[in-house]
Image (cartoon, helix red, strand yellow):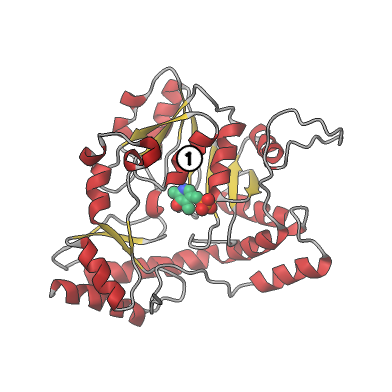
Amino acid sequence: MTYKYVVAKPSLTGRELEYVTDGIKDGWISSKGPHVTGFERAFADYNGVAHGVSCSSGTTALMLALRALGIGPGDEVIVPEFTMVATAWAVTYVGATPVFVDCRDDLNIDTGAIEAKITPRTKVIMPVHIYGRRCDMDGVLRLAYEYNLRVVEDSAEAHGVRPVGDIACFSLYGNKIITSGEGGICLTDDQRLADQLVHLRSMGFSHNHDFIHRKLAYSARMTDMQAAVAQAQVEQLDDFLAERREIERRYNEGLADVDGITVLPPRDVLWVYDLLAERRDELHDHLARAGVETRRFFRPMSQQPGYLDPVWPTLNATRLADQGLYLPVYIGLTASDQDYVIGKVREFYGS
Ligand SMILES: *Cc1c(COP(=O)(O)O)cnc(C)c1O
């Protein structure tokens, strides 16, 4: 099926091609090239954080962050029910156990429900700024302080939300707010953690080239070609966020009064335009026939085969996931494109 309006696509009209071309002309295409440090510096500075360590994906960033904090078998990590499976998998990859907490009506982790899930084995809280809404970080940090836990933020969908945890992990996958095709980055103010992350992403090579690998590490670097694209994207991030804010405003305006649609609370940064819809699956098909690609929400973690828990049908996350849909959002989506999409939604509900 080819759509007139896809749900997401990258915008690559800044200096992406110039930076990639420079790298290829100079022969710097591996992870040793100048754009890797260029991107890391630019993104860390943008966020007001001391260190940036890039890697091969957002999922890898989460896994490296947990390893850098020394998390492993026997440890428990608090993870939201409503997230992309990568958050939970990162915990499983390091041999620890994810412990799931249900969400509020804004889809973010219910910080009031975390305390009941903390045990002597709990080591980390992993909040996710889902769909670009910053979660209650005051609540997370208060609990982390009280119970001596570390905080790893899954910021994969929230470029532009300032990190406050021990490590914040971003994805640069093709549908994210900024992209390098595939890629990820960890931000931290802690020099020691940054050193660990560098060590872990790069096979644990030692500085003196003795080829003694002191702990199990990974081959998880970002190439200079990816970093060249990422660096050019960071330069445009403020413009992207402003254009996305305008897209959000226009959808809100066009959909607020539609009987059958529940407009969700504002986002801190617009990644996707999420909403709740009556007869959601029929709306999805109606829009698809009109050439508009949409996506249903993530399914709760307790419904995933790897984490199956019979509580899942009772969760707030399930109730919201059953009704959730998100609409096309990308740089270059015009007001008239949005009018078309909004018109097709209104047509479906006869409003
Ligand atoms: C995209 C995403 C990830 C994973 O990022 P990849 O770069 O695709 O590995 C992790 N968590 C959330 C919430 C995401 O949306």
Q: Residues within 10 Å of mark 1 (few under 14, many from 20)?
A: many
| Residue 206 appears left or right of 312 | right
Quadrant including the N terminus:
bottom left
| Residue 233 appears left or right of 91 | right
Can the viewer see residue 138? Answer: no
Residue type pointed to by label 1: Trp
Where is residue 333 drawn, in percent x and y?
41, 76
Residue 270 quadrant: bottom left
Where is residue 196 drawn, in percent x and y?
67, 34
Question: For this rendering, which residue is in front, 155 or 205?
Answer: 205
Residue sitting at x 26%, y 69%: 285
Residue sitting at x 36%, y 41%: 301
Can the viewer see residue 117? Answer: yes
Residue sitting at x 32%, y 44%: 300
Residue 133, above or below 140:
below
| Residue labelled with disc 1 | 89
Quadrant including the C terminus:
bottom left
Residue sitting at x 56%, y 39%: 63
| Residue 219 appears left or right of 253 | right
Q: Is mark 1 within 8 Å of ligand 1?
A: no
Question: For this rendering, which residue is in front, 1 or 37?
Answer: 1
Instruction: Report helix, strand or loop for mark 1.
Output: helix
